[in-house]
Amino acid sequence: MVSNDCDLLIFGAAGDLSGRKLYPALFQLHCADLLPTDMRIIGLARRHQDRQQFLKAIKHRVDRASEGDPAAEQWARFCQRLEYCCIDFGKCEEYPQLAAHLSPGRRAIFYLATPPSLFGPICEKLGANALIDPQSRLVLEKPVGQDLASCQAVNETVAQFFSEENIYRIDHYLGKETVQNLLVLRFANRFINAQWDQSCIDHIQITVAETVGIEGRWSYYDGVGQLRDMVQNHLMQLLCLVAMEPPNAMTAESIRDEKVKIMRALRRIDAASVGAHAVRGQYAQGWYRGEAVPAYMEEADSDGAESDTETFVAIKAHIDNWRWAGVPFYLRTGKRMPEKLTEIVITYKSLPHNIFFTGENIPNRLVIRLQPNEGIEMQMVSKMHSLKNKMALARQNLNLDFLGSSGMNRIPDAYERLFLDVINGDPSLFVGREEVEEAWQWCDALIQAWQSQAMPVSHYHAGSWGPAKAELLIERDGRSWHE
Ligand code: BG6
């Protein structure tokens, strides 16, 4: 067995992601005794602070994430792993100090929680200072680039220093328990897989809705928008996992091959089809749980100028292959929606002939809920008990509640799974080079189509399910969003 002895170096350790997700996840793994015994975690950032100040800041974030004060003894032991190093990532001459933090012979894992424009330069400087060896691993946070060209440039540069098998591109949605369960549902249950195609399925919806707005990230987000921030990665990954053929094995290579085939079969949305297939929205003022919410343009850190950046996207997509011919995939994602909700809804075709004379032909639905209340719900039709009305039918749910059935008191955060997989060298839940480039190619085409048609954003009230055009997108087909 390959040893999992390693040290982890986190570039961007003072950033939001590190405080909100990375250190809390590492702390949970530490408490569960899942980290290699001697693994050290070296936080790297430009901020001048000593180790004590750094630990204090991290403790604050871990407390918040674990909703309490972690046991003092556990925290003290976790701190023994933590180091801090102040470094300007742009200065090659500052990198030699990293050697003092690396243990000879032990694998180094370089985790880049930085903007993608730094991925290439950081690797070049690590390389120039001979800090990379053949067993080193590189973890790249999303997004890898801003479009196909910049993504290819990053991939080219990092490939000069790391082999593809040592590059772990994160899409944290792949680390979510229910996403992994989606694979199990599909490929460990024969009756599900047997009815997973155009002969039985009417359409599929994927919704990723967030109640939050831009949360202090306005200046970054305004140059990015919801398509690049959420669709290019999270929604496309979910789409691939729902639509792909069974991989030969649960290996990274097999899974990636199948995902790439789906991305290549995803019909491009061009200038002629964009009006009927994609909607862009931006939130205006509204209400959330009784409180007034500002418009996107009025968020505290906005620059006050007009912006046409989308905070909502709805798409009707088609996969041009044998399995999915004629089955639309409706995707929608937005900020400042009424609920935080991520779900995949499979609606089956209606019965070819209804013998129950109830008037309504109720289709089956399979709802795969990623958050909140992770679980799977099969909506079936069954008879209501009634003497008066002999054959009253109603939709009833078969529920699989993951938290309840796991015997755990919490569902692990996606980053816990992903850290473990990087440490143990299992890349199956990470994104391959071809996939990320295909995903950009598809999104670039859509962005160009929007630009060529000068398609402005449609406004929606914060706290609503998006602009009216998004309703129309699906209602035109005689269907409605699952709510
Ligand atoms: C990130 C996006 O990748 O995912 C954020 O950049 C978004 O804008 C976040 O808020 C959502 O993640 P989750 O796990 O809370 O659904």
Image (spheres, rainbow, N blue to C red):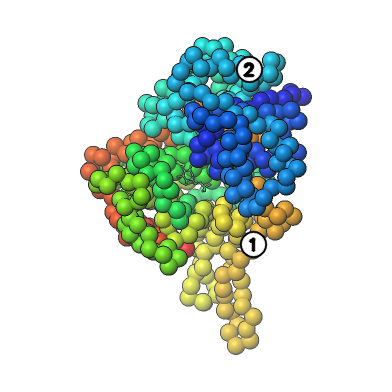
Q: Earlier in the sequence, mark 2 or mark 1?
A: 2
What residue do we see at 56% from left, 14% from top? 96
Mark 1 C-beta to ligand 1 under 8 Å = no
Instruction: Tell me the mark number nearer the camera, choosing from 2 and 1.
Output: 2
What residue do we see at 42% from left, 27% from top? 117
* Circle 2 residue: 100
* In contact (CB < 8 Å): disc 2 and disc 1: no
Secondary structure under tag 2 reads: helix
Q: Amino acid at mark 1?
A: Asn
Q: Is residue 375 visible?
A: yes
In the picture as drawn, the residue positioned furthest to the bottom comes out as 388
Mark 2 and mark 1: Cα distance apart in space: 53 Å
Numbered label tally = 2
For the residue carrying disc 1, how many other residues have a C-alpha within 10 Å: few (<14), some (14-19), or many (20+)? few
Q: Residue 349 location, x and y as percent?
A: 50, 59
Secondary structure under tag 1 reads: strand
Q: In the rendered view, does 64 fall on the left or right side of 232? A: right
Q: Residue 47 location, x and y as percent?
A: 49, 30
Q: In the rendered view, does 418 fall on the left or right side of 280? A: right
- From the viewer's side, name the closer residue of 182 and 425: 425
* Circle 1 residue: 399
The quadrant in which residue 85 appears is top right
Q: Amino acid at mark 2?
A: Ala
For the residue carrying disc 2, how many other residues have a C-alpha within 10 Å: few (<14), some (14-19), or many (20+)? few
What residue do we see at 43% from left, 67% from top? 290
What residue do we see at 54% from left, 60% from top? 365
- From the viewer's side, name the closer residue of 358 and 444: 444
The quadrant in which residue 162 appears is top right
Q: In the rendered view, does 411 fall on the left or right side of 276? A: right
Compared to residue 241, the image places residue 152 above or below, namely above
**Residue 419, numbered circle:** none
- Quarter holding the N terminus is top right
